[in-house]
Image: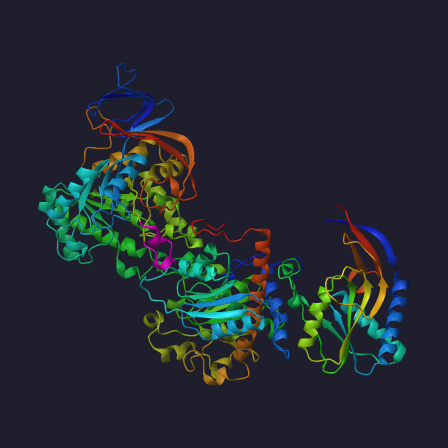
Amino acid sequence: MTKNTAWTKKDLLGLKELTREELELLLNTAESFKEVISREVKKVPTLRGKTVVNLFYEPSTRTRVSFEIAAKRLSADVINIATESSSVRKGETLIDTGKNIEALKVDIIVMRHNCSGAALMLAKNLRASVINAGDGWHEHPTQALLDMFTLKERLGRIEGLKVSIVGDIAHSRVARSNIWGLTKLGAQVTICAPALLIPPGIEKTGVRVTSDIDEALADADAVNVLRMQFERDAENAFPRQLEYFKNFGITTERLKGAKKNILVMHPGPINRGIEISSEVADGSNSVILEQVTNGIAVRMSCLFLVSGANENIKKVGRLTSLPVNRLKRP
Amino acid sequence: MSMKEKAHIMDKNGMQRTLARMAHEILEKNKGTRDLVIVGVRTRGAHLAERLAQTIEKIDGHKPPVGILDITLYRDDLSSIAQQPVVHKTEIDFDIQDKKVILVDDVLYTGRTVRAALDEIIDFGRPQFIQLAVFIDRGHRELPIRADYVGKNIPTSPKETVEVRLEESEGKDEVVVLESND
Amino acid sequence: MRILIKNGRVIDPANKIDAVLDILVEDGRISKVARDIKSDPCDLIDAKDRIVMPGLVDMHVHLREPGREDKETVASGTRAALHGGVTSVLAMPNTTPAMDSAENIRLLRDIIKKTACCHVFIAGAITRGREGRELADLASMKKEGIVAITDDGSSPDAEDVILDAMTRAGKENIPVICHSEDKAYVNQGVMNLGFISTQLGLRGISNESEYKRVARDIQVAQKTGAAVHIAHISCRESVELVAAAKSKGLRVSAEATPHHFTLCDEELAGYDTNLKMNPPLRSRDDVAAIIRGLADGTIDAIASDHAPHTENEKEIEFDRAEFGVIGLETELAVSITELVEKNILSWSELAKRLAYNPARILGIKKGTLSVGSDADIIIVDSTREWKVAQETFVSKSKNSAFLGRTLRGVVEYTICCGKVAYRR
């Protein structure tokens, strides 16, 4: 770990823009928070007096609760705003909503939004820190960080690991963030999906692409099984859930062709019998519940680092993200 | 801010003698090692805690458990984290409930680090009491905190810094006073 | 009233002129183009070291009036045109109401008569309400003076409709401007389909959506003999189709916008909604193909596809923002910076793309400096650099894809109908 890396970004928007050192810092800091949350008193006073708003434009219980617990473990005050966002434009714009929340003297906005790029847009327009809790199909950085944290905790490293990601890659922000993060830390990533769910050019990220699930599992140290969201586009692409399960579902039978200790991960909530069998989800290879626990440590790490950076930015009086929408990011 | 060395206060032998004296004082005041635990503040306080525990073992034949505190999360200035961003684990693998805790740090100055450390220890349980052992006390307290065991008092000006260098972290045992150039 | 323009480098592809000459303007017309003209002019303009060329003819402009006067009006749009060196625009018919009947065209003509600051030509709709079903009455619209028909913004999907439309347009000798887009391939896309859309997690629009429709439109043109103009061509395959059609001698022409020959989809990394337009910014490879098409003459015209939108429609999530960018005030400078400075087009070729060819395609007497023609002339400082900023625009809307960029070429005078209509 590079000693001199300091976190200087007021926001956490995605893993694509982070350096290897920044990723390592996030993960190492999370390790310390993992110790904190295993204490008798699971709370530290670090963010006392800070206010975190969970602004969720998409229904999500687990990510929101995980962020809420993380913020509370750091002694921040947490307010949840759940907005059913309709596809038609009506009412307040996102920037206006953000500015109103900021006017309430909020320090960090954790946002989930159904439009890709929404987190960046909010971050560019606010002085408050923005943590992306998932934007459209674009990125879900904290999910990928907790996946990587779990890998590192279980297998001791990420460099050189073979990780397969199986499922609807085209519409998955979890897949994208994992690809950026894992490849940056030196893992060999394979993505596996029906041809229609592989987005164009994805091989340029350095991943191996296959539609053969057995090939994807054969030498993998871990498999990250994505939730199949048949209610979205996937409906047209791959009509029958059963057929998907038959061809891509992770089952005990299928794992016979994989390494004995392969880790089975899933961002949740799982669809038993669609992308994963109950036997595997509850079996000895599964680290699905550990991922949930690790999510708190990782999110504490993110909240902590962006707060520290923003505090420092306020002191120095300069922003790393430009406050005006129309200025392009370098 | 560049610093220059102003005075050499202690060498390796002097430091060993001072640690031995502090170990004796701790044993004397607490009548042995019963219920005694030692907790050092990262990074140098943790090294000194380990040395004190070893010295106590030489004298008493019994080594008290040693823990390490990382007080970053208990600091009262969040922006200082940007300069010192790496949070390490706190490692206290024993129960501190009803224990006699000796809190160890290298230099006692404003008292803010000790305040943070006290808060953190108390989150781990309710000790019988906490005593404070510092290798150097350089004055200028900003909080009502005093040490129970002091290696050496060094009156300083706020422009000066006292550095306790240790073999474990700096490769050499010595105590020096530094002065800023401006 | 006389204006004498002295010592400018006169570019007039219609008469194959590229030389330092004087131009005398009298009574709204060009009366003389020669060396050392002596006259007692009312106005003398020293054009030494300046480019003097025909006022631009922009054959793809959304003036938004009637219906969306908050975005642009005939008055504001034509003022913007003059600022950009454009003296003739073709107004697209996707207004509210659409320009799909003689009555609506009379309404627009009335507005133009009262408020326009430059020449405004009108394109009528192909189908009623631009819905792609029932043909609009071409003959009566032609009587009201339309110079082209288009359903710009959409394309009639039904082949019998476009076949009928082109047959009639051929008979009336009115060009058909094709917004060649097959929505079936668009799939709710908001940007070019490719590795960049994959990275950004945005829905992509494939090249097929354009070139399959270009292929159809060319095919129908061949069947009917109509003059067909492919608007805002954006991808390599379309350029190839147009080149093939031309080599077969078909009456096919094409235009490209400055943003499509300058910017590629990689620019979208910051989700800048001012880079969201339809057709979308394509790949690097496509941009190179457009530039080749401009260089070899496959692409006849440069047009802005000036599409003003309010801040409220742009400063929102990328998925929800409107498609389109303004372009009247930057098209000349972008073309100079990207094409002339980079030796892709000569000044004469540039004047062809920006003035002479669009006028020829539309069959209007514009785009030349011939003696006797309307005095629509611009004088350009081709070396001066400027930075595009919101406050540099005259247009009501500021949604430019070139904000923040440094461009070369500043319009110093725009003379329209023999009068100095804009002066820097």
Q: Is residue B79 left or right of residue A87?
A: right
* Percent coordinates x, y for residue B35 in the rendering: 79, 82
Residue C310 counted in the magenta span: yes
Locate the C terminus of chain C by quadrant: top left
**Can see residue B16?**
yes
Q: Which residues are magenta?
A: C309-322
Please state which of residues A144 and C272 is positioned toward the viewer in this rendering: C272
> What residue is drawn where x is 53% and y is 74%?
A69
* Percent coordinates x, y for residue A27 in the rendering: 60, 67
* Percent coordinates x, y for residue C105 in the rendering: 14, 45
Res C402 → quadrant? top left
> What residue is drawn where x is 47% and y is 62%?
A104
> What residue is drawn where x is 54% and y is 75%?
A291
Q: Is residue A215 above or below residue C86?
A: below
Res C5 → quadrant? top left
Residue C249 counted in the magenta span: no
Q: Is residue A136 left or right of residue C358?
A: right
Please state which of residues A61 and C100 is positioned toward the viewer in this rendering: A61
Total marks in image: 0
> What residue is drawn where x is 37% and y is 49%?
C286
Q: Is residue C340 left or right of residue B48?
A: left
**Can see residue A267?**
no
Q: Is residue A149 left or right of residue C143?
A: right
Please state which of residues A90 and B116 is positioned toward the viewer in this rendering: B116
Q: Is residue A243 above or below residue C30?
A: below
